[in-house]
Image (spheres, rainbow, N blue to C red):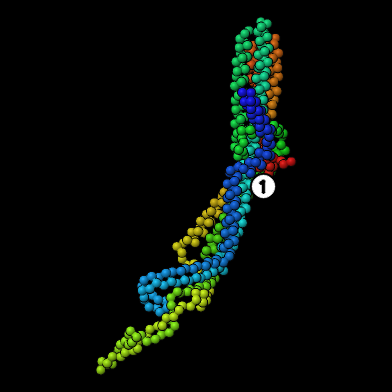
């Protein structure tokens, strides 16, 4: 029994030590962003799209190379078929082997290969921009989730401070009730307030846990149970607010990755139009082929009299009707030549050039050109729309950041006023000028004011992050 108790005790100590070690690491914003960029599923999928464009470039390069194909066949012919040696139809079983090589190369095809290679290079650039855009979006989402954790942490501290204050107030009220200075109902009100404080504290703990879980899932972190962040603080001011919205928009047009990707898409669509138009032009190709064969039948080595049918009638003499006959001969078969010798003797080459001039092909080329032009116009309109969206987003972000700063300053002023009001209420309660209900009201207003300061603070920080993001400032500054 004693040994079992010791084993259980050591197990609990080991488990506790493991939990402490697991909880020892606290993630910074930089670490969270870096980890998310490496492991987020959306980024991985976008990265696969970028790899696909590299394969497409390999296809475009391969189009410049000649095509070469080797073919071979070996056949068995059973029954009535032509003897390739005598040319006669016979019931026999023969074997025949053939082999060949075909080579072809495009000499000119309307510069389609060149344009496909240029398009592939542009598609790689566009895919890289889209990958960076996805990384930026994920980084912004991580920053928002990270700031939400910091807000929930500070909000939990406020709720804990409120609970601690009310517990001390309950002790003080118990003394006053015992001394007869305040009625017992005040003590009951304080206990009810403490119960409400406990509920608020539990809600704040749950909100913190959920915010941690949300960030851990965004990062694709497996060990999210022990995930925690550093208690970092952020400055309340940003130099980017000193810039004019027009300046920020001008800078954003030069640096925003989504605009770069949209411009690259326009260039890709322009190449598609050139590729489609290339089908209007003639196509000149060169070809070369090599072929050889071998037979497994006996070959004809000579001719001799046909003893079974020495003669045959080929006509008659007019007037006398006398038959005209000729001697019949049959081929003398000998052993076939060696297979390798046959391949060497029967080989042949052919080469040349082929010109294909398109005249009428069911409007296929014309329709492909029209589709490409429509796609080009669509990408151009998309680029224009993204520029308009960017301008609207920049001005909105600037207005939101300015408004969030004003809201934060107002919340700080209100919190100071509520704190002074609470101090004054405490003094009046101590001398019996107000009851506990009025004191609780002052305390609740003070706590709400502190929570509002936290909410406006992190709302302002995130809106400034968005504005800095448009200005080209990264989500975090590497040390």
Which of the two residues, 156 or 420, is positioned nearer the viewer here?
A: 156
Q: Is residue 469 visible?
A: no
The residue positioned 66% from the left and 42% from the top of the image is 34
Q: Is residue 278 above or below residue 49?
A: below
Q: Quadrant of residue 32?
A: top right
Residue farthest to the right? 479
Q: Quadrant of residue 236?
A: top right
Quadrant holding the C terminus: top right
The residue positioned 54% from the left and 51% from the top of the image is 378
Which of the two residues, 318 or 421, is positioned nearer the viewer here?
A: 318
Task: Count all numbered tags in the image, as a single digit.
Answer: 1
Q: Position of residue 36 (x, y in %)?
A: 63, 41
Which of the two residues, 145 or 429, is positioned nearer the viewer here?
A: 145
Q: Is residue 479 visible?
A: yes
Q: Position of residue 134 (x, y in %)?
A: 61, 44
Per the image, label 1 sits on a secondary structure element best described as helix
Q: Is residue 298 above or below residue 328?
A: above
Q: Is residue 235 above or below residue 102?
A: above
Residue farthest to the top? 180
Q: Position of residue 167 (x, y in %)?
A: 66, 16
Residue farthest to the bottom? 319
How many other residues sit within 10 Å of disc 1, few (<14), some (14-19) or many (≥20)? some
The residue positioned 61% from the left and 23% from the top of the image is 1
Q: Position of residue 5 (x, y in %)?
A: 63, 24
Which of the two residues, 199 or 251, is positioned nearer the viewer here?
A: 199
Name the residue carrying label 1.
Answer: 255
The residue positioned 59% from the left and 58% from the top of the image is 58
């Amino acid at each position: 029994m004693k040994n079992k108790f010791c084993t259980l005790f050591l197990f609990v100590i080991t488990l506790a030590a493991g939990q402490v070690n697991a909880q020892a690491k606290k993630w910074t914003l930089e670490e969270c962003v870096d980890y998310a960029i490496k492991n987020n599923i959306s980024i991985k999928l976008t990265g696969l799209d970028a790899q696909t464009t590299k394969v497409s470039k390999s296809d475009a390069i391969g189009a410049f190379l000649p095509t070469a194909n080797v073919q071979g066949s070996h056949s068995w012919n059973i029954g009535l078929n032509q003897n390739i040696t005598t040319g006669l139809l016979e019931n026999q079983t023969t074997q025949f082997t053939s082999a060949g090589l075909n080579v072809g190369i495009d000499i000119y095809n309307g510069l389609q290969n060149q344009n496909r290679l240029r398009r592939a290079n542009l598609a790689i650039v566009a895919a890289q921009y889209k990958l960076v855009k996805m990384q930026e979006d994920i980084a912004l989402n991580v920053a928002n989730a990270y700031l939400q954790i910091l807000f929930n942490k500070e909000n939990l501290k406020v709720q804990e401070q409120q609970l601690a204050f009310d517990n001390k107030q309950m002790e003080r009220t118990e003394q006053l009730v015992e001394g007869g200075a305040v009625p017992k109902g005040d003590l009951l009100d304080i206990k009810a307030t403490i119960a409400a404080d406990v509920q608020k504290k539990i809600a704040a703990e749950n909100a913190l846990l959920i915010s941690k879980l949300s960030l851990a899932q965004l990062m694709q972190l497996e060990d999210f149970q022990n995930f925690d962040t550093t208690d970092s603080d952020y400055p309340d001011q940003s130099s980017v607010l000193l810039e004019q919205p027009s300046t920020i928009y001008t800078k954003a047009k030069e640096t925003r990755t989504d605009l770069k990707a949209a411009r690259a898409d326009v260039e890709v669509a322009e190449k598609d139009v050139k590729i489609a138009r290339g089908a209007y032009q003639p196509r000149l190709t060169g070809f070369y082929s090599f072929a050889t064969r071998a037979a497994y039948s006996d070959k004809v080595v000579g001719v001799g009299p046909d003893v079974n049918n020495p003669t045959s009638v080929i006509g008659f003499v007019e007037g006398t009707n006398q038959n005209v006959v000729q001697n019949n001969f049959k081929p003398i078969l000998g052993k076939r030549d060696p297979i390798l010798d046959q391949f060497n003797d029967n080989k042949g080459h052919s080469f040349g050039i082929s010109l294909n001039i398109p005249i009428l092909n069911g409007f296929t080329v014309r329709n492909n050109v029209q589709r490409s032009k429509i796609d080009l116009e669509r990408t151009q309109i998309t680029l224009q729309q993204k520029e308009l969206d960017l301008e609207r987003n920049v001005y909105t972000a600037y207005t939101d950041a300015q408004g969030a700063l004003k809201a934060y300053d107002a919340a700080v002023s209100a919190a100071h006023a509520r704190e002074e009001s609470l101090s004054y209420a405490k003094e009046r309660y101590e001398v019996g000028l107000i009851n506990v209900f009025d004191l609780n009201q002052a305390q609740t207003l003070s706590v709400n004011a502190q929570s509002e300061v936290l909410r406006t603070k992190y709302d302002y920080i995130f809106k400034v992050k968005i504005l800095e993001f448009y200005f080209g400032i990264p989500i975090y500054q590497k040390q």
